[in-house]
Image (tube, helix red, strand yellow):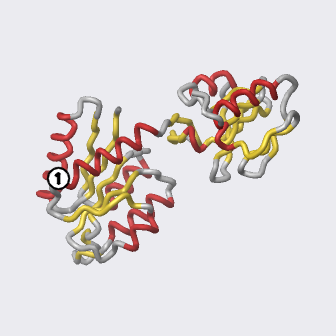
Amino acid sequence: MTVQIALCDDETAELNRTEGLLSAYAQKHTDADFIIECFESADALLCSIREEKYSPDLVFMDIYLPGETGECVPLGMEAAKQLRDMGSMAKLVFLTASREHALDAFDVEASQYLLKPIQADKLYPLLDRLLEKEEREQYILLRVEESFKKVSLNDIVYCEAQGKHQCIYMTDGTKILQNLTMAKIYEMCSSCQNLVKVGASYIIHLEHIDSLNAQVARMDNGQKIYLPRGGYRLLREKYFDYYCGGE
């Protein structure tokens, strides 16, 4: 499993220490392939994400970073908010000598705080938890507006053929248009057994079906899918297998 990790800390010693601990963890876990990038300022990290299309999976961010006057202020929290505004779904871990901003972490969906100096007995159990979750989640990469976006298969409600394009409806209400065939998208999604192809025009996520009858599948985002002829029987079987323990 390849994991892109960004480290952001203006203290070189702490940056090197955290990088060393991560490298040691990766050496002991052969299934963990870490690609680590180090940044000494929030601006450098944000610029790389914005201009170079860098998309880390995990970000370790020092809360207190030097501002324009050289005084250390909680720029890490502000940078984290900008990350979320840019659509980053990276897991955030704040590095700090103080828990003063702990409540603010909820606003940016941070995974945890780690107090400096970072210790292996605190870092490694956190990595175990974060990487286990990362492994359970399945993703595909889609090209969206001249860049690539990592899309969780669990967040796909359904996909619908619209002429030469396919429209993917997401749980957050967004729609992603793709100039790909339905067969290609289904192939990309094949690792998720809960995504079921229904006729030639739909791929439906079983988890997001709210109700189902012979004519219509009602999805949990409020939309209705009018089922093609012959589509109900297959979808019903898959639906009941999923909810009634069929493995």
Residue 235 on image: x %, y %: 75, 29
The residue positioned 50% from the left and 41% from the top of the image is: 150
Q: Nearer the viewer, residue 170 or 7?
A: 170
Q: Is residue 145 visible?
A: no
Asked if residue 180 is positioned above or below residue 147 in the image, the reply reads above
Describe residue 203's horizontal placement relative to residue 229 as left or right. left
Q: How many numbered markers are drawn?
A: 1
Q: Nearer the viewer, residue 34 or 204?
A: 204
Q: Give percent across and percent down for residue 118.
A: 17, 58
* Above or below 124: residue 184: above
170 and 181: which one is in front? 170
Which residue is identified by label 1? 121
Within 10 Å of the Cα at label 1, are there few (<14), some (14-19), or many (20+) other Cα atoms?
Answer: few
Q: Quadrant of the N terminus?
A: top left
Q: Is residue 64 among what the camera can see? A: yes
**Looking at the image, which residue is at 63% across and 25% down?**
186
Q: Amino acid at mark 1?
A: Asp
The quarter of the picture where residue 213 lies is top right
